[in-house]
Amino acid sequence: MRRAACVCLGLALCIGVASRRAAAGGLENGVYLELEGGGSFWDDANVSVSRIGSGKVKFEDGWTAGGAIGFRAFDMLRLEAHGSFRRADLDSVHAGSISVSGQGWAGSAAFLGNAFFDVPIPFFPVHPYVGGGAGVAIFSADTNGNSIHVNGDDTKFAWNAIGGILWPVFSHLELDAHYRYIKSDDPTVDAKVFGLGDGKVKAEFSAHEVVGALRVVF
């Protein structure tokens, strides 16, 4: 009984210390793992289709999911390797005299190195932060319209800028909500233009994303 009581008391003290640290708004230093997901809203893109001409692509609202491994030092500096995937269905494609509606999707897998500056605020439950980074994005697309069939991928330089807030809800556990703007060089994918033969589709890419994340600090 005495041993059990000591164990219970020790657990209660640990929980109390962790809760007070979280309530005080403390940030944990160390290696962390992160999982995230949210909405991805692609900007309308100028597009150039060989053998047809220029035009514009519009996208439906999409989604994004990803994860990261990183390290925080000095309660404020974070460095991480981040990977994410985003996908959006096509709303419409207009190029030259050709229009395609609601037939296909586009996706982007991004692998970026990011740096963040967390702002620890003593005795405040949430902390703002800003950051960004650069890397590569692998684009893929699949459409099967009556006039254009796209099925290919391309790798381009990409970068992102991020601002958000984090909440240390418990020792070693943080919740995160942030806005991300991500952009890349223009990807180019192979296409078949019916009646005209093989061609290329070159389009712009940029997206606005609202993301929630769960972070575990070791």
Image (cartoon, rainbow, N blue to C red):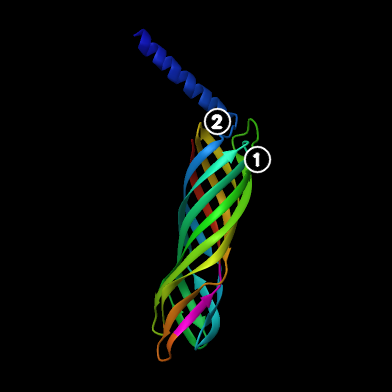
In the rendered image, the residue lying farthest to the bottom is 195
Position of residue 69 measured from the top left corner of the image (x, y, whole percent):
49, 46
For residue 19, above or below residue 50: above
Q: Amino acid at mark 2?
A: Ala
Sequence-wise, the earlier of marks 1 and 2 is 2
Q: Relative to residue 90, is residue 209 drawn left or right?
A: right
In the rendered image, the residue lying farthest to the left is 1
Does 204 lie within the magenta span? yes
Q: Main secondary structure of the magenta part?
A: strand
What is the number of callouts on the image? 2
The residue sitting at 57% across, 55% down in the picture is 180
Does 98 lie within the magenta span? no
Q: CA distance from mark 1 to mark 2?
A: 15 Å
Q: Amino acid at mark 1?
A: Val
Position of residue 171 measured from the top left corner of the image (x, y, whole percent):
51, 31
Q: Quadrant of residue 100?
A: bottom left
Q: Disc number at residue 29? A: none
Question: What residue is pinned by disc 2?
Answer: 22
The residue sitting at 63% across, 48% down in the picture is 130
Q: How many neighbours does mark 1 have within 10 angstroms: few (below 14), some (14-19), or many (20 or more)?
A: some
For residue 45, above or below residue 37: below
Question: What residue is pinned by disc 1?
Answer: 119
Mark in the foreground, 1 or 2: 1
Badge 1 element: loop
- In the rendered structure, which segment of residues is drawn in magenta? 199-205
